[in-house]
């Protein structure tokens, strides 16, 4: 990242966007220590005070936490809630509600797995996976940004499909020959940040509902690790839960 001092946006906000994007893109995994203040100062050529201000901002957002004398770490989400027994893709959910939607793929490329991605998809560090980024429009308006990381070892040739038109869940099932069994999902309120805000055409400090989801095939095989960013004023989570006997 290069700091742009010719724009009106304060430097500390640019640094906060840099830190936030590294967390959102899974460059820094949950519970992982981020670079030290000195390392950030040197790499971005900024002052210690600017680094502190940016880090404190993300601590307040709940993305980072600090341990005195040790450093700053990415927050671990250790609480999740089940939203029922059925697993639908967002496309299937929209179809069920009879809402007109359109999907546009804006990025589709193979990337090398970081430690975090490798652990989620059960592949080797440095092994290639398919990264895909899509925008979904509902009744003509951008409402969600979808980032998919697909285990191409389980889905060879998945990159050949047209995901402007095809369902990712259905394609993964067809290629793998296995049904999607379940997912581990977490929802959280987040600030969208500069990069994803531009893609959703909202201000960088806009609230979004963030879904992190790890999808498994039959046999407990992790096939896709995704992040979905939903406009907070356009989406809500609803469910019917059955109480279990204690």
Image (cartoon, helix red, strand yellow):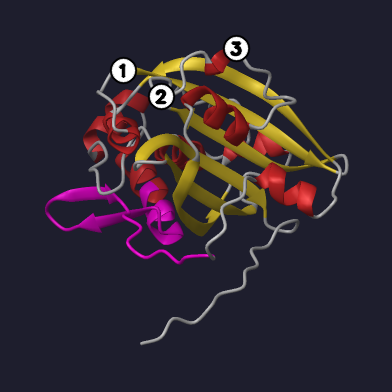
C-alpha separation, residue under disc 3 versus residue under disc 2: 14 Å
C-alpha separation, residue under disc 2 versus residue under disc 1: 13 Å
Earlier sequence position, callout 3 versus callout 1: 1
Residue assigned mark 1: 127
> Is 210 above or below relative to 16?
below
Q: Quadrant of the N terminus?
A: top left
Within the magenta stretch, is there residue 186? no
Earlier sequence position, callout 2 versus callout 1: 1
Q: Residues within 10 Å of mark 3 (few under 14, many from 20)?
A: few
Q: Is residue 9 visible?
A: no
> Is 192 above or below relative to 153?
below
- Hey, which residue is sitting farthest bottom in the picture? 246
Earlier sequence position, callout 3 versus callout 2: 2
Q: Which sits in the foreground, 10 or 236?
A: 236
- The residue range painted magenta reads 55-83
Q: Position of residue 110 (x, y in %)?
A: 46, 15
- Hey, which residue is sitting farthest front in the picture? 177
Q: Secondary structure at mark 3?
A: helix
C-alpha separation, residue under disc 3 versus residue under disc 1: 19 Å
Q: Looking at the image, which residue is at 58% across and 44% down?
A: 228
Q: Position of residue 108 (x, y in %)?
A: 57, 18
Of tags 3 and 2, the one toward the viewer is 2
Q: Which sits in the foreground, 104 or 97?
A: 97
Q: Position of residue 208 (x, y in %)?
A: 62, 53
Of tags 3 and 1, the one toward the viewer is 3
> Is 153 above or below relative to 67?
above
Residue assigned mark 3: 160
Residue assigned mark 2: 154
Q: Quadrant of the C terminus?
A: bottom left
Q: Secondary structure at mark 1?
A: loop
């Amino acid at each position: 990242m290069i700091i742009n001092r010719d724009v009106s946006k304060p430097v500390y906000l640019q640094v906060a966007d840099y830190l936030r994007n590294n967390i959102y893109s899974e460059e820094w995994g949950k519970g992982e220590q981020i670079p030290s203040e000195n390392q950030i100062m040197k790499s971005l050529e900024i002052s210690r005070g600017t680094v502190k201000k940016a880090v404190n901002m993300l601590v307040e957002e709940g993305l980072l936490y600090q341990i005195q004398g040790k450093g700053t770490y990415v927050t671990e989400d250790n609480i999740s809630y089940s939203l029922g027994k059925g697993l639908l893709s967002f496309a299937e959910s929209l179809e069920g509600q009879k809402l007109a939607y359109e999907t546009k793929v804006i990025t589709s490329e193979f990337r090398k797995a970081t430690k975090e991605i490798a652990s989620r998809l059960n592949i080797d560090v440095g092994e290639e996976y398919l990264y895909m980024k899509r925008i979904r429009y509902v009744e003509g308006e951008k409402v969600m940004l979808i980032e998919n990381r697909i285990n191409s070892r389980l889905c060879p040739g998945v990159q050949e499909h047209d995901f402007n038109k095809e369902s990712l869940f259905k394609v993964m099932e067809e290629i793998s020959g296995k049904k999607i069994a379940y997912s581990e999902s977490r929802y959280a309120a987040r600030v969208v940040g500069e990069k994803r805000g531009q893609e959703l055409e909202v201000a960088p400090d806009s609230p979004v509902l963030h879904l992190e989801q790890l999808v498994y095939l039959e046999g407990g095989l992790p096939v896709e690790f995704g992040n979905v960013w939903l406009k907070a004023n356009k989406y809500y989570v609803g469910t019917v839960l059955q109480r279990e006997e204690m």
